[in-house]
Image (tube, rainbow, N blue to C red):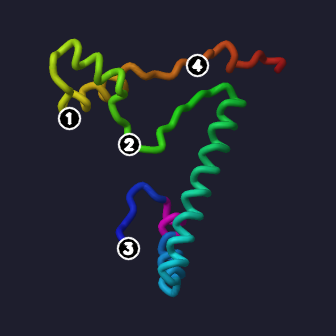
Amino acid sequence: MTKSRGLTAEQQFMLHRIALEIQSLSRDELHQALLDCWEARFRQKQSFIASAKEAGFSFQFNEGIAVMPATAVEEFEDFHGHAPTWEDAEDYLEQIQENVHMELDMDAIVLEPEE
């Protein structure tokens, strides 16, 4: 097992304990455990998104790898006359990341002294 960065001591301990426990599982049992973990991950994500929405926050997560949308590819080809390279796609994604920001309505968050 590799050393996981950014995890607490408790999380590292749990991963080590799980590694010891799964040594006796069969291949089919490991496959099922992996599928169960992904299902739990998706359910946690749905719960987080629903809770955040109730609190007034909006998040959008991609399940796969971030890619350049087809419409952006077509626009790029029309403008530049060639299909985008990987570098062009990376530049596009960096540009999106720079433009994305979260705005909070501080008036709605800050409570009056009597509230």
Badge 3 or badge 2: first in the primary sequence: 3
Is residue 59 placed above or below 76 in the rendered structure? below
Residue drawn 68% across the image and 20% down it? 109
Query: In the drawing, what numbered circle is on residue 1?
Result: 3
Residue 66 located within the stretch drawn in magenta: no
Residue extent of the magenta highlight: 8-14
Is residue 11 placed above or below 61 in the rendered structure? below
Badge 2 or badge 4: first in the primary sequence: 2
Residue receiving disc 2:
65
The three-letter amino acid code for the residue at tag 2 is Ile
Disc number lying in front (1 or 4): 1
Label 1, label 4: how far apart the Cα atoms are:
34 Å
The secondary structure making up most of the magenta span is helix
Residue receiving disc 4:
104
Label 3, label 1: how far apart the Cα atoms are:
33 Å
Residue drawn 55% across the image and 78% down it? 29
Disc number lying in front (3 or 4): 3
